[in-house]
Image (cartoon, rainbow, N blue to C red):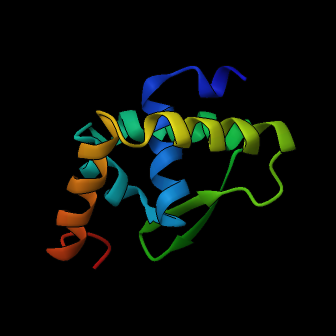
Amino acid sequence: SEACADETRRRILLLLLAQGELCVCDLFGALELPQPKVSRHLAVLRDADLLVSRKQGTWVHYRLNPEMPLWAGQVLAALSDGAARSEPYLSDRERLKASRAAATCCA
């Protein structure tokens, strides 16, 4: 799918695969990208039925679609096996961990 072709979208997918559910503010903090850019990528992934979202107050939380096509799950698993221990994925997870520990989001 074209949705998985972009590096930023792959980074988002791997963070969600590792964390389960994340707020949009978690994502733009971890990726060090502007919120509008991250939101555009999230919309592409949602339109491809790879993500589902829920609104909580002013924040939107995203998670992988539990009903995504089998091929998409297989691609994510392969991507995780091959890339999750390399950059920029390692740094993304470290930044996410630091920002969550500081509770700077979704308050």
| Whole-percent x, y for residue 17 in the image | 55, 55
Q: Is residue 49 visible?
A: no
Point out the image quarter for the C terminus.
Answer: bottom left
Query: Which residue: 58% across, 39% down?
Result: 43
Is 23 placed left or right of 26 in the picture? right
Location of residue 87 (image quadrant): top left
Query: Which residue: 42% across, 30% down?
Result: 8
Is 103 placed left or right of 3 in the picture? left
Q: Is residue 48 above or below residue 25?
A: above
User: Foreground: 58 or 6?
Assistant: 6
| Whole-percent x, y for residue 105 in the image | 26, 69
Location of residue 45 (image quadrant): top right
| Whole-percent x, y for residue 102 in the image | 14, 74
Q: Is residue 92 visible?
A: yes
| Whole-percent x, y for residue 71 in the image | 82, 36
Query: Which residue: 27% across, 59% down?
Result: 96
Is 13 placed left or right of 88 in the picture? right
Q: Is residue 5 above or below residue 35?
A: above
Query: Which residue: 77% across, 61% down?
Result: 66
User: Foreground: 85 or 26?
Assistant: 85
Point out the image quarter for the N terminus.
Answer: top right
